[in-house]
Image: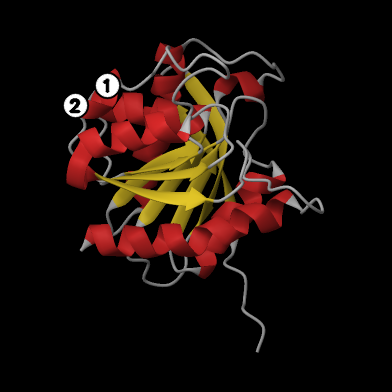
Amino acid sequence: MARVATPEERITIEDGRVRVSGVYARPADPPSMLVVAHGAGSGMDHPFMVGFTRAMNDEGIATLRFNFPYIERGRRSPDPAPFLEEAWRAAFAAASDRAKREPVWAGGKSLGGRIASMAVADGMPAAGLVFLGYPLHPPGKPERVRDEHLYGIDVPMIFVEGTRDPFATPELLAGVIAKLGDRATSISIEGGDHSFNVRGPKRDPREVAAALAQPVAALIRERTG
């Protein structure tokens, strides 16, 4: 029997200066909810984002994906980090309002995940973090590591990273995860680049992202207890 897709609800998230769009989906009795932010160059309706959140719903996890304000305005350049954090806190609050008993996690693709971690380091009460391609350093500049705030975070962190990601040299990422200790778990995508594409025939981003959902959902269930 074909799986019935979880219905999605388009919502407006408003809080102070923030007014952005979101998509909320809730399977029956989810053990957790995951709020997901997009990467720098695409919004919440990019096929990668759609594929990942729908596959997480199939795994029983509730999701809320949302746009940052610059995407809502049709701009390409991200807003300053403090305003991105403000949008993150607004989206997290919207998810928390919709949650019942389940814990609410935060995460995202590249920039979206990094800003989530900054917001959590600044006090956003997420139950855990999911990084889909954490931008540990700029491409070709491994000396500029963006990890200092991670060590002040005391919730579980799941790093999903391709072994060919130019934003995260495998050796450097392994060192960061080792320093984080039991708080951090990694899922390594062999041959994957920053978008988790591997060499060979091109795959639909929905399919690429959906393949990440099962191991992520399993770890969320495990780390939620």
Q: Which mark is residue 149?
A: 1
Label 2: which secondary element: helix
Asked whether disc 2 touches disc 1, contact meaning CB atoms under 8 Å apart, the reply is yes
The total of numbered circles placed on residues is: 2
Q: Nearer the viewer, residue 48 or 141?
A: 141
The amino acid type found where label 1 is placed reads His
Q: Is residue 203 left or right of residue 59?
A: right
Residue 143 image position (x, y, % from top left): 42, 12
The amino acid type found where label 2 is placed reads Gly
Q: Quarter holding the N terminus?
A: bottom right
Image quarter of residue 225 = bottom left
Q: Is residue 4 above or below residue 126?
A: below
* Residue that appears at 82% across and 54% down: 201
Q: Which mark is residue 182?
A: none
Any part of residue 139 in sight: yes
Residue occupied by mark 2: 152
* Residue that appears at 34% across and 60% down: 219
